[in-house]
Amino acid sequence: KIPEPQVLRQEFTLRTLYPGDETELSEHLVRLSDADRRIRFGHTVSDRFLHNYAQLMLRPGALVHAAMVDGMIRGVAEARPAFATEGDMEAAFTVETGFKGRGMGSALFDHLMRAIAAAVHRRVVMAVIRSNTRMIALAQKNGANLLDGPAQVPAPLADELVEDVLCLVLDLTNSPWA
């Protein structure tokens, strides 16, 4: 019998992003497929929107980390102060299609939770569209709880997708990251 070919796991490194990394961040976001853009932002967004968003991601108070492959950003974990509850951090993640299923999302999740805990935040909220089963599974595997009812999401998404958005909450108080 011929042995099955082994799929090699692509190596990546994690690093913190800072002001000045907007161009590389923008390039990553623009490489996201339409499906990945919908998973991240709740609807299809234009390249122009993504270029503008990249300029805002690294503002004060935000924590942004990247998974790098061959010097290029292929995944991002970001957290910023939550709009609904003071003291909470809102987290979001992107991984380019060709790099999913290789542990990058899990590594980014772990890295971001450590950074949030180190910044003395104890609760993380994630607004996730229902079809983003990978993110829901990853968050729940790490202790996040699904809240009843639709998530509170900032405009313009509130009018469009409130029925499709779930809210996951992770309490870091007694977590491995605390």
Image (cartoon, rainbow, N blue to C red):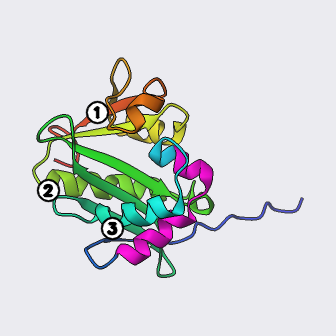
Q: Is residue 33 magenta?
A: yes
* Residue with the mark numbered 2: 118
Q: CA distance from mark 1 to mark 2?
A: 18 Å
Residue most extreme to the top:
148
First in residue order: circle 3 vs circle 2: 3
**Image position of 82 with respect to 159: above or below:** below
The quadrant holding residue 107 is bottom left
Q: Residues within 10 Å of mark 1 (few under 14, many from 20)?
A: many
- Magenta span: 22-38
**Image position of 143 with respect to 72: above or below:** above
First in residue order: circle 1 vs circle 2: 2
* Residue with the mark numbered 1: 169
Residue most extreme to the right:
1
First in residue order: circle 3 vs circle 1: 3
7 or 157, which lies in front? Answer: 157
Amino acid carrying mark 2 in the image: Ala
Amino acid carrying mark 1 in the image: Val
Classified by dominant secondary structure, the portion drawn in magenta counts as helix
- Name the residue: 49% across, 68% down: 28
Residue 26: tell me if it is visible: yes
- Name the residue: 56% across, 51% down: 36
Looking at the rendered image, the disc whose residue lies closer to the viewer, 1 or 2, is 1
